[in-house]
């Protein structure tokens, strides 16, 4: 087997194994209901994680995701409460704003040669701050269109439901996989992760690729914000704190190298599932503190970083010297 | 006289200046269709500046470039590539994490319905590489192939993209003889297809093997262009350095050293890296290490220095058993080691010349006893002068120095620790002829001062010049030791070959 599939395979095995363990203890967990909930509950995180996958594949990082999700929620809540424009128009508007916001960060990262960490950190404060400027309260969204959207679902055999947002996440992943592996842009993203200077020498349009990567991450963070507002029916500027870190975790557990250049969008989906599974298990157990989620994910993340280190070491056998 | 039609690329009166220096002064360069043209000169002669002007990496200050008779003005390397000038560098400039096919077609992937058509791309990649005698799984990551194959992929990409002029910048520096032969077969085939090929290298044998014409630059000036067949080696070297150096390199060999035996390694080795060997080194002696690539030369050095701990045998200094299990321990016993790959294992590029020079001494003193700035300055200046390190001042970041000067700075780093046992791994690799001679002279003077040196080199004649004994390696074992009259290029080659024969029988 090719070495680059190793982390992905490990992730899938870990997921199947842990799911089997969960089912052994709580047979009820093997139901379409649980799977449907897994999709719905993690939809916003999954969508944001797709964007994060592209950013990390290119060797960057986007810390602004959680703040952009909160900003999107508050923006929608405020707009829908105070104006009469249709939610779809509001969606389009907010997606335009977050995409531009991402593109701007990408442009700064490239043209001012600033580390993505700092630029997106500033973006995080800016987006969170803008959310506070719009409103410091948690504003409920009571628009009837929201209720309509939430009523759409696809019924699975066994009583489970794939809700609109759960389905949307799967669709985003599908499109993400296509973009990553079947477009020139996708290859360029991997090229940047392999080495910016070399990519440039080989004719990769580094500037526009960087801008588009962060724009994509902004777009998906905005979409994630819309999904989040559908999920919670509210906009709150303190919401979604740390979601970017959960997204990064999903990406890394999904087998993508933090240094960029290697990984798969599909792996991120499995990473999301693993995180969701741990959460579901704790809900089923009922006695465990929800902090166990964090502890387990922490351990898992650590294990994956070790795995990646091991693979890197294996794939680069000591060069034969003279 | 040739007409301009013979020339695929003509650079006329190219000028390029950097603050304080004139890197190229009205240099003419003509490349014919279907020739391999070697571009030679010492480091700093202007070879890379000329190449960078041709490929648009630098903007020239004056002069004109004609490609196929048309005046061109490439804005950047990508632009030059589109016009027809492709470049392959020593460090393969491809992306190790992409597949071979993606590397070949990056930016030009065939598409169907807006999506990359991976099947067609892989098919075309296989066809393309078949022209280069390569039959690879093109879907595998480039990193899974050897440097030589990566180099050929880089050439395939450059030729496919550009197709008129191919610039090979030190392509053979990290290849072994077999791989060089493969590369040269490909170069000859491209030449037959009518490409103009510019070949830059430090290996003069290779120049004679492959090139049709030679252009020599010195200090930013054109020295001349000659037919290779009409230029002998001595004249070529004279053109390059403007002084007779050949004689110096082939100086009469020194008699066998009479110093006392100081270092005694018995059954020393490390499993999987170098088989146990015995080695004795006297004071004031240079022991050369010869062998083919991969025979265990660097491994020997690393085990001696403790970079890889020996797992068998003993080391003695003056009869005392010592522990050399780490570089720190080795440094305590006054060992020094200049590694082969100075870019990754030697210099700290962003630190100044001064900081690089005092590094090892400071490390040995420990951080609780810092060297005063005045002391550092004194040491740096002393070695910059002693080794003739060409730098504007001691505070210049070392990465801005030429290869030979970097090498001298690393040497200075170890000399500053006043070592008694110094290991030099390929001290003359990748540096120009002039610096080469200086390093050789330096090795001799260190020996005269009573140091014990181990020198690893793939240039056998060089080993012959300064070694009092030569150890020959093969398959990670020490297979022969030559001393006294038996040290000659011929004998060393014989020893390597004999070892090979024994293996074969």
Image (cartoon, coloured by chain):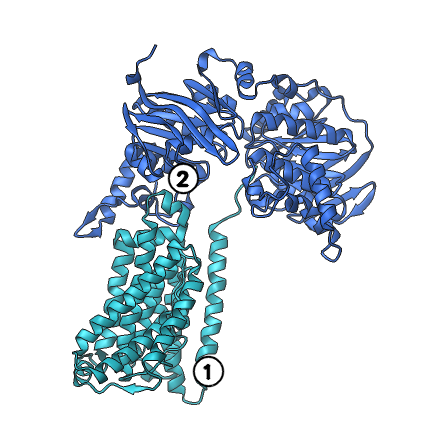
Chain colours: A cyan, B blue
Mark 1 and mark 2 in contact? Answer it, CB < 8 Å: no
Above or below: residue A196 compared with residue A275: above
Q: Which mark identifies residue A291?
A: 1
Image quadrant in which the N terminus of chain A is located: bottom left
The residue tagged 2 is B150
Q: Position of residue A167 (x, y in %)?
A: 23, 73
Q: Position of residue B192 (x, y in %)?
A: 32, 22
Task: Name the residue at 69% across, 21% down.
Answer: B486
Does the rendering let one see residue A189? Answer: yes
Q: Could you tell me which secondary element the residue under label 1 belongs to?
A: helix
Q: Position of residue B341 (x, y in %)?
A: 56, 40
Q: Is residue A91 left or right of residue B501?
A: left
* Cα separation between marks 1 and 2: 49 Å
Nearer the observer, A128 or B447: A128
Q: Position of residue B319 (x, y in %)?
A: 83, 41
Task: Name the residue at 70% across, 37% down.
Answer: B383
Among the 4 quarters of the image, the one containing residue B227: top left
Above or below: residue A101 compared with residue A82: above
Circle 1 packing at 10 Å, graded few (<14), some (14-19), many (20+), is: few
Nearer the observer, A210 or B303: A210
Among the 4 quarters of the image, the one containing residue B502: top right
Task: Name the residue at 51% across, 27% down.
Answer: B45
Q: Is residue B301 left or right of residue B89?
A: right
Task: Chain letter for mark 1, please.
Answer: A
Q: Could you tell me which secondary element the residue under label 2 belongs to?
A: helix
Nearer the observer, B213 or A140: A140
Circle 2 packing at 10 Å, graded few (<14), some (14-19), many (20+), is: many
Task: Chain letter for mark 2, please.
Answer: B
Does the rendering let one see residue B182? Answer: no
Q: Which mark identifies residue B76?
A: none
Instruction: Work out which residue is located at the far bottom of the displayed protein and give it.
Output: A287
């Amino acid at each position: 087997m090719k070495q680059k599939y190793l982390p992905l395979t490990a992730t899938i095995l870990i997921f199947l194994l842990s799911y089997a363990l969960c089912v052994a203890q709580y047979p009820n967990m093997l139901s379409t209901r649980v799977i449907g909930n897994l999709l719905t509950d993690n939809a916003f995180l999954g969508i944001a994680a797709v964007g994060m996958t592209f950013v990390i594949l290119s060797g960057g990082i986007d810390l602004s995701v959680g703040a952009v999700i909160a900003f999107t929620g508050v923006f929608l809540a405020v707009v829908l409460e105070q104006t009469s424009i249709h939610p779809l128009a509001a969606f389009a508007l907010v997606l335009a704003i977050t995409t531009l916001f991402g593109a701007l960060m990408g442009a700064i990262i490239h043209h001012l040669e600033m580390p993505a960490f700092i630029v997106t950190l500033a973006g995080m404060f800016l987006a969170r701050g803008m959310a506070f400027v719009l409103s410091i309260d948690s504003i409920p969204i009571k628009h009837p269109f929201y209720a309509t959207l939430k009523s759409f679902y696809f019924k699975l055999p066994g009583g489970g439901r794939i809700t609109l947002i759960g389905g949307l996440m799967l669709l985003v992943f599908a499109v993400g996989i296509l973009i990553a592996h079947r477009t020139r842009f996708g290859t360029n993203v991997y090229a940047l992760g392999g080495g910016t200077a070399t990519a440039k020498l080989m004719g990769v349009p580094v500037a526009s690729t960087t801008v588009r990567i962060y724009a994509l991450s902004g777009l998906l963070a905005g979409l994630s914000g819309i999904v989040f507002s559908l999920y919670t029916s509210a906009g709150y500027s303190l919401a979604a704190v740390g979601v970017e870190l959960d997204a990064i975790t999903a990406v890394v557990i999904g087998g993508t190298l933090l240094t960029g250049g290697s990984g798969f969008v599909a792996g991120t989906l499995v990473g999301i599932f693993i995180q969701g599974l741990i959460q579901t298990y704790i809900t089923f157990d009922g006695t465990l503190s929800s902090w166990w989620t964090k502890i387990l994910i922490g351990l898992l993340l650590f294990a994956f970083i070790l795995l990646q280190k091991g693979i890197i070491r294996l794939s680069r056998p000591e060069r034969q010297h003279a | 006289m040739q007409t301009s039609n013979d020339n695929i690329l003509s650079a006329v009166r190219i000028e390029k200046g950097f603050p304080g220096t004139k890197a190229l002064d009205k240099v003419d360069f003509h490349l014919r269709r279907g020739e391999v043209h070697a571009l030679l000169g010492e480091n700093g002669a202007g070879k890379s500046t000329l190449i960078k002007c041709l490929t648009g990496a630098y903007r020239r200050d004056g002069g004109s470039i004609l490609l196929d008779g048309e005046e061109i003005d490439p804005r950047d390397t990508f632009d030059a590539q589109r016009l027809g000038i492709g470049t392959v560098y020593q460090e393969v400039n491809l992306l190790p994490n992409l597949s071979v096919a993606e590397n070949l077609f990056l930016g030009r992937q065939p598409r169907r319905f807006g999506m990359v058509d991976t099947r067609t791309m892989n098919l075309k990649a296989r066809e393309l590489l078949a022209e280069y005698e390569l039959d690879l799984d093109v879907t595998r990551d480039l990193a899974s192939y050897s440097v030589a194959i990566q180099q050929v992929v880089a050439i395939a990409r450059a030729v496919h993209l550009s197709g008129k002029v191919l610039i090979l910048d030190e392509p053979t520096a990290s290849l072994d003889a077999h791989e060089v032969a493969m590369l040269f077969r490909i170069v000859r085939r491209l030449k037959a297809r009518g490409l103009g090929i510019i070949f830059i290298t430090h290996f003069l044998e290779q120049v004679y093997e492959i090139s049709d014409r030679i252009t020599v630059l010195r200090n930013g000036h054109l020295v001349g262009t000659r037919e290779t067949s009409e230029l002998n080696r001595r004249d070529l070297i004279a053109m390059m350095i403007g002084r007779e150096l050949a004689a110096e390199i082939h100086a009469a060999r020194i008699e066998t050293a009479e110093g006392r035996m100081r270092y005694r390694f018995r059954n020393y080795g490390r499993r999987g890296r170098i088989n146990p060997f015995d080695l004795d080194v006297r004071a004031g002696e240079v022991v050369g290490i010869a062998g083919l690539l991969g025979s265990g030369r660097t491994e020997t050095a690393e085990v001696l220095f403790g970079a890889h701990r020996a797992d068998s045998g003993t080391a003695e200094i003056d009869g005392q058993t010592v522990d050399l299990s780490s570089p720190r321990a080795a440094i305590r016993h006054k060992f020094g080691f200049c590694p082969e790959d100075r870019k990754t294992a030697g210099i700290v590029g962003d630190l100044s010349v001064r900081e690089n020079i005092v590094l090892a001494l400071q490390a040995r003193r420990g951080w609780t006893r810092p060297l005063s700035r005045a002391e550092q300055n004194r040491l740096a200046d002393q070695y910059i002068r002693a080794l003739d390190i060409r730098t504007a001042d001691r505070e210049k970041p070392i990465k801005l120095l030429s290869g030979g000067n970097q090498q001298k700075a690393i040497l200075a780093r170890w000399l500053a620790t006043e070592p008694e046992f110094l290991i030099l791994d390929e001290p003359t690799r990748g540096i120009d002829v002039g610096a080469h001679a200086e390093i050789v002279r330096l090795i001799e003077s260190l020996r005269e001062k009573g140091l014990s040196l181990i020198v690893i080199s793939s240039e056998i004649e060089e080993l012959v010049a300064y070694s009092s004994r030569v150890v020959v390696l093969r398959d990670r074992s020490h297979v022969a030791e030559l001393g006294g009259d038996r040290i000659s290029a011929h004998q060393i080659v014989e020893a390597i070959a004999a070892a090979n024969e024994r293996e074969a029988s």
